[in-house]
């Protein structure tokens, strides 16, 4: 195989893993960082941060490959996905499955230095990532299942940092489920017409004409749960300022999705990076900046 051919395969694998579209990785990373900072009181070990950041990238990449493998016969009929490598048949199913296996194996190697409880949680995370694409065949709200899969870094982070998940960790996972319902419904609104034709089930279809209301209620529930977490942990104004900033961003998303245009819905989905970042900024300010200011 020539260098040009190798580069072509690498480009296809990069596209298959969505390395050219980092938004998915960020939507997994923010909740994991929330959990790491809260579980350690704002002082996570650098090795844990590195392990979870790289693990997030690897598992998101593996999840994308598995998703495209599962949807390889549906994606050619959807305008936004018809050019994906498996849909366009430029990458074989054997190549895709091998790539996914390598990514999962590398992810598991990363957690070996951590306590065994995290190993078992990692196995559950792999199952969730592998099974999510198939929930779109029968489950009316696959985005809720995605929220568990995308948020499973939360219990893993708590277990790695403290040896147990605890009520706060599981509560934050519930918050992430509602956040994923919000942003992935926005994403599903982009493909609603195509999904109806091919028989895929999504939250955008299930919610129907109440889709915009449902998205906003999911944002509100997410922030309400996280506010309850902050109250339980006796956090102060800086933490809640982060939640307020996220609420303002959710309000902006409403202006993007209220007319249900494809561009606006997709822009709102992508903008959720800033929603997660605002919450993380509030956590860091509360746990790291506030003690420094008080010295």
Image (cartoon, helix red, strand yellow):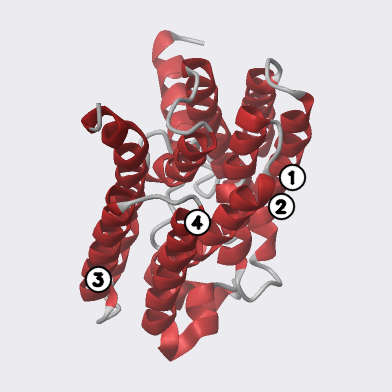
Residue at (69, 29) in percent of width and height: 101
The mark nearer the N terminus, 1 or 4, is 1
Find disc 4 in the rendering and name its residue. Answer: 229
- Mark sitting on residue 251: 3
The mark nearer the N terminus, 2 or 3, is 2
Q: Looking at the picture, does residue 244 appear above or below residue 1?
A: below
Residue at (28, 37) in percent of width and height: 290
Q: In 3D space, how far apart are the residues under numbered discs 1 and 4 (Cα atoms)?
A: 28 Å
Q: Residue furthest bottom?
A: 209
Q: Is 121 displayed left or right of 207 in the figure?
A: right
Mark 3 vs mark 4: in front: 4
The mark nearer the N terminus, 2 or 4, is 2
Task: From the top left corner, tell me how far across and down residue 46 is, in percent.
Answer: 46, 17
- 189 or 73: nearer the viewer: 189
Q: Is 12 displayed left or right of 278 in the figure?
A: right
- 9 or 264: nearer the viewer: 264
Q: In 3D space, how far apart are the residues under numbered discs 3 and 4 (Cα atoms)?
A: 22 Å
Find disc 2 in the rendering and name its residue. Answer: 131
């Amino acid at each position: 195989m020539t260098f040009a051919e190798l580069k072509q395969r690498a480009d296809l694998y990069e596209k298959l893993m969505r390395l050219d579209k980092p938004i998915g990785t960020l939507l997994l990373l923010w909740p994991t960082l929330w959990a790491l900072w809260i579980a350690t009181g704002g002082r996570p070990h650098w090795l844990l941060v590195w392990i979870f950041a790289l693990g997030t990238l690897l598992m998101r990449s593996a999840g994308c490959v598995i998703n495209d493998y599962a949807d390889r016969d549906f994606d050619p009929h959807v305008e936004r996905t018809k050019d994906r490598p498996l849909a366009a048949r430029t990458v074989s199913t054997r190549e895709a499955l091998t790539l996914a296996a390598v990514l999962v194996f590398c992810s598991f190697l990363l957690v070996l230095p951590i306590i065994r409880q995290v190993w078992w949680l990692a196995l559950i995370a792999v199952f969730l990532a592998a099974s999510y694409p198939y929930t779109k065949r029968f489950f009316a709200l696959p985005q809720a299942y995605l929220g568990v899969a995308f948020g499973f870094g939360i219990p893993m982070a708590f277990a790695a940092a403290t040896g147990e998940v605890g009520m706060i960790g599981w509560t934050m996972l519930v918050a992430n489920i509602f956040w994923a319902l919000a942003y992935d419904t926005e994403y599903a609104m982009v493909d609603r017409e195509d999904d109806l034709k091919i028989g895929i089930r999504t939250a955008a279809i299930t919610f129907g004409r109440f889709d915009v209301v449902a998205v906003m209620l999911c944002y509100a529930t997410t922030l309400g749960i996280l506010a309850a977490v902050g109250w339980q942990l006796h956090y102060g104004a800086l933490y809640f300022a982060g939640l307020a900033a996220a609420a303002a961003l959710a309000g902006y998303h409403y202006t993007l999705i209220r007319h249900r245009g494809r561009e606006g819905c997709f822009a709102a989905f992508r903008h959720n990076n800033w929603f997660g970042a605002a919450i993380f900024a509030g956590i860091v300010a509360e746990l790291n900046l506030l003690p420094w200011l008080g010295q």
